[in-house]
Image (spheres, helix red, strand yellow):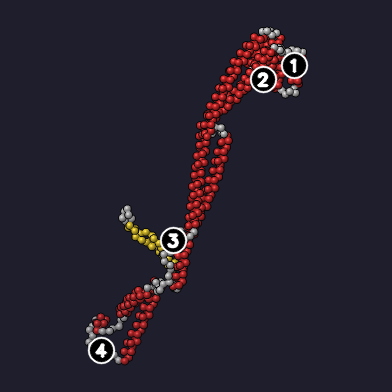
């Protein structure tokens, strides 16, 4: 059956516009089947055409399905990539929460506000320190009229408060310590016994808890000294008022200095964040570009997937077919072969030629003497006379039988030649 199926290309001559040359363009193909039964030939030719159309449809659907499947895989890959980049951006924002480019204006504004607040605090500290200097001058005038013991007790009380508030290394503490040393005429002593013990207690509290044995021992000694009257303070109202004002100023200055340090720390932090912003912005923009590129690729893949799905739906129908059946197979009204007239003519020609050749061969190979010429050729002498053939009934009967045998032989030979040529041509 494969040998009897024929597929022939259909060519159409077209002329190229640019060169003007004519060439053949394949515009289709035909399928046919050679068989003995016309109906079977029509059915097989139709099946062959349907097989071509079905294979074309299957190829188109498989190609579209493969494209859709590939795009599904690529979309999942891009979705995972986008999730990974978004996680990196979230981690980056968390690590550089204060140095992001979006916060640069806010950080600059906070820096200006912090600088102004720091300058305001510094002005307030200078104002309070000037006020304290003025009140300390007034206090020194009053102290000239107060006994040395009361003055020393007051200074020691201020020293203890300063140690508890600022620590033993603060400039005000050192100043009071030198003042106490000058009043007691003992520069190395650093103050009275009560002041020294309270200074030691403040130092120990920085290192140990309240239940430490050394802390408890110092507390007992300080209480004993206070009960003995070593810490009595002066009772002059003006003196006490000035001292209270100075203490209030000291408290305010301490609070402002603490606020000043906080503002300085905040200022340094803001300056560091602003200084890091260009580098952070570069890395942040790089991550944003990666996310944008991945997002554009993801959107492109989704668009291509939608197109591939539409193509797949289109290709599965008849409208997307690349091959169309122009004409259905029909049963032939007459056989297409073999060409009987041509075979008959050819057989007649061959039979005639063969008969002539056989006759010539028989004539050449026959050694019968049939006339005076044959006598001359054989005997090299002329015949004296010729006896004519007597055409009687016997002669005529043999003549007819001979002609009949020759005719039948020629006819049989012609039929055999026609059959041979027809079989070869079919």
Q: Earlier in the sequence, mark 3 or mark 2?
A: 2
Q: Is residue 3 visible?
A: no
Q: Earlier in the sequence, mark 1 or mark 4?
A: 1
- Report if the CB atoms under discs 4 and 3 are less than 8 Å apart: no
The residue mark sitting in front, 1 or 4, is 1
Q: Position of residue 297 (x, y in %)?
A: 49, 45
* Between 127 and 318, the one nearer to me in the picture: 127
Residue named by callout 1: 222
**Residue at position x 49%, y 57% from top?**
313
**Residue at position x 60%, y 15% from top?**
131
Crowd class of label 4 (few under 14; some 14 to 19; many from 20; radius 10 Å): few
- Report if the CB atoms under discs 1 and 4 are less than 8 Å apart: no
- Report if the CB atoms under discs 2 and 4 are less than 8 Å apart: no
Q: CA distance from mark 3 to mark 1?
A: 113 Å
Q: CA distance from mark 2 to mark 4?
A: 182 Å
Tag 4 secondary structure: loop
Which residue lies most toward the bottom here?
393
Mark seen at residue 323: 3
Q: Is residue 379 left or right of residue 92?
A: left
The residue mark sitting in front, 2 or 4, is 2
Residue named by callout 4: 387
The residue mark sitting in front, 3 or 2, is 2
Residue named by callout 2: 165
């Amino acid at each position: 059956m494969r040998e009897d199926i024929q597929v022939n290309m259909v060519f159409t001559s077209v002329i190229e516009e640019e060169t003007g040359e004519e060439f053949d363009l394949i515009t289709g193909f035909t399928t046919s089947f050679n068989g003995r039964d016309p109906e079977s030939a029509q059915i097989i030719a139709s099946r062959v055409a349907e097989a071509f159309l079905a294979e074309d449809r299957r190829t188109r659907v498989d190609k579209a399905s493969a494209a859709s499947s590939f795009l599904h895989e690529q979309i999942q890959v891009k979705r995972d990539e986008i999730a990974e980049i978004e996680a990196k951006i979230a981690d980056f924002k968390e690590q550089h929460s204060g140095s992001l480019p979006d916060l640069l204006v806010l950080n600059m504004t906070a820096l200006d506000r912090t600088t102004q607040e720091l300058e305001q605090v510094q002005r307030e500290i200078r104002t309070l320190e000037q006020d304290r200097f003025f009140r300390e001058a007034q206090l020194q005038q009053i102290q000239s009229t107060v006994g040395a013991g009361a003055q020393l007790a007051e200074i020691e009380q201020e020293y203890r408060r300063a140690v508890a508030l600022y620590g033993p290394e603060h400039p005000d503490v050192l100043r009071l310590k030198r003042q106490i040393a000058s009043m007691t005429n003992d520069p190395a002593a650093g103050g009275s016994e009560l002041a020294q013990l309270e200074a030691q207690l403040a130092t120990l509290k920085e290192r140990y808890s309240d239940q430490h044995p050394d802390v408890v021992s110092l507390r007992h000694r300080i209480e004993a000294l206070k009960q003995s009257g070593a810490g009595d303070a002066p009772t002059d109202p003006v003196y006490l008022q000035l001292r209270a004002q100075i203490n209030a100023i000291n408290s305010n200055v301490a609070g402002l200095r603490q606020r000043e340090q906080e503002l300085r720390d905040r200022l340094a932090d803001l300056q560091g964040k602003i200084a890091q912003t260009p580098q952070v912005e570069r890395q942040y923009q790089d991550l944003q570009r990666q996310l944008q590129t991945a997002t554009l690729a993801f959107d492109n893949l989704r668009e291509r997937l939608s197109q591939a799905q539409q193509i797949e739906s289109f290709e599965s129908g008849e409208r997307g077919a690349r091959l169309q059946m122009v004409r259905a197979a029909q049963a032939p009204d007459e056989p297409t072969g073999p060409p009987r007239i041509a075979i008959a003519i050819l057989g007649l020609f061959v039979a005639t030629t063969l008969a002539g050749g056989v006759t010539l061969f028989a004539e050449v190979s026959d050694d019968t003497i049939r006339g005076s010429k044959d006598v001359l050729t054989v005997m090299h002498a002329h015949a004296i006379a010729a006896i004519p053939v007597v055409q009687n009934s016997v002669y005529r009967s043999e003549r007819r039988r001979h002609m009949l045998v020759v005719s039948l032989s020629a006819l049989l030979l012609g039929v055999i030649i026609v059959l041979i040529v027809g079989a070869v041509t079919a």
